[in-house]
Image (cartoon, grey):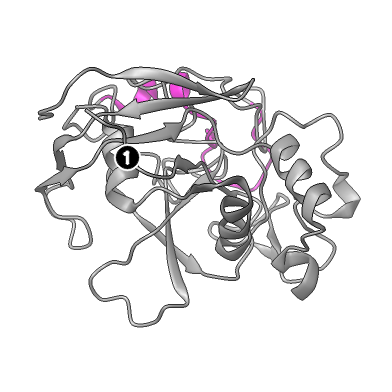
Amino acid sequence: MIQCSLLYVLFAGSDTKFVAVPAGKYRLGMAGMLDNPPRIVELASFEIEIYDVTNAEFTTFVRSTGYVTDAEKQHNAMVFVPPMPEFRWSLDPTASWRFPNGRKLGGIEGKMSHPVTTISFRDASAYCKWAGVRLPTLDEWEAACRAGTTTKFFFGEDEKLIGQYANIWHGRDHLKPDYSDGFMYTSPVGTFKPNPFGLYDMYGNVFQFCTGHLHGDRTSAIVHARGGSWWCSKNACCFYNSADIGSVNIRASFSNQGFRVVKLGSIRQ
């Protein structure tokens, strides 16, 4: 259910693409979800980037500002190197956005088109302030992801189609590497099919930070992310859908966590 006007694509600068999501009423949530129950929300128009922020873009930010990320300060980044039991991650003091899976596994050279990872919500917010953009709200992200659909996935209810649209973990467990879709960790942005609004990697590659809090949040140290990641599988953390909402500490940094941005302000209708 979308009561809105035309959807169109805008170009900001030479190579950054944004999709304009029109103002209107959007059906969000899912039956049985306490944190995200079915409801209709009215949103102002907004412009959301079709890709996650890349290593190249974050490199430009760091070079321009000298910014040092939380993981680089606190040496608290969490990484995944198989074999590991389900839902287990390892603290690696050498990991940061420059070395997402730790120094032993190499840096981001040759991966400038991959989404930046191993950053915290605070880091993403600092980038946004510098770039003159912002993070999407929880409702904006879902409205953009659903693209007018009301099913669990924007492509319907058949979960078997997920591999066409997202870089996820296809293995039965995480005890051995999974390269079945060509990538164990991140993939270049835009590698898989987009949603009907032309947004890529909404269900995989990396989780995407959003602003806003859920009913029941007891501390401002908890923030939220959506969309699933390369680590998410059918049997573990199957958050690669339009409804689920993840939670993480505001200063935590994981190698499957990134973000996409929204332009400041609204679009005149």
- In the displayed image of the protein, which residue is found farthest to the bottom? 218
Local packing at callout 1 (Cα closer than 10 Å; few below 14, some 14-19, many 20+) is: some
The secondary structure that dominates the magenta segment is loop
Q: What residue is disc 1 on? A: 266
> Over which residues does the magenta segment extend?
158-179
- In the displayed image of the protein, which residue is found farthest to the front? 268
173 within the magenta span: yes
Give the amino acid at mark 1: Ser
User: Can residue 91 be seen at all in this image of the molecule?
Assistant: no
74 vs 132, nearest the viewer: 132
- Can you give x and y, in whole percent of width and height, for residue 223 in the image? 44, 66
130 vs 158, nearest the viewer: 130
- Locate the C terminus and report the quarter of the image it occupies: top left
- Locate the N terminus and report the quarter of the image it occupies: top left
SS class of the residue under badge 1? Answer: loop
Residue drawn at point x = 28 percent, y = 19 percent: 7
Residue drawn at point x = 90 percent, y = 51 percent: 104
Residue drawn at point x = 82 percent, y = 55 percent: 102
136 vs 163, nearest the viewer: 136
Horizontal arrangement in the rendering, residue 46 relative to residue 163 (left or right)? left
- Number of marks in the rendered image: 1
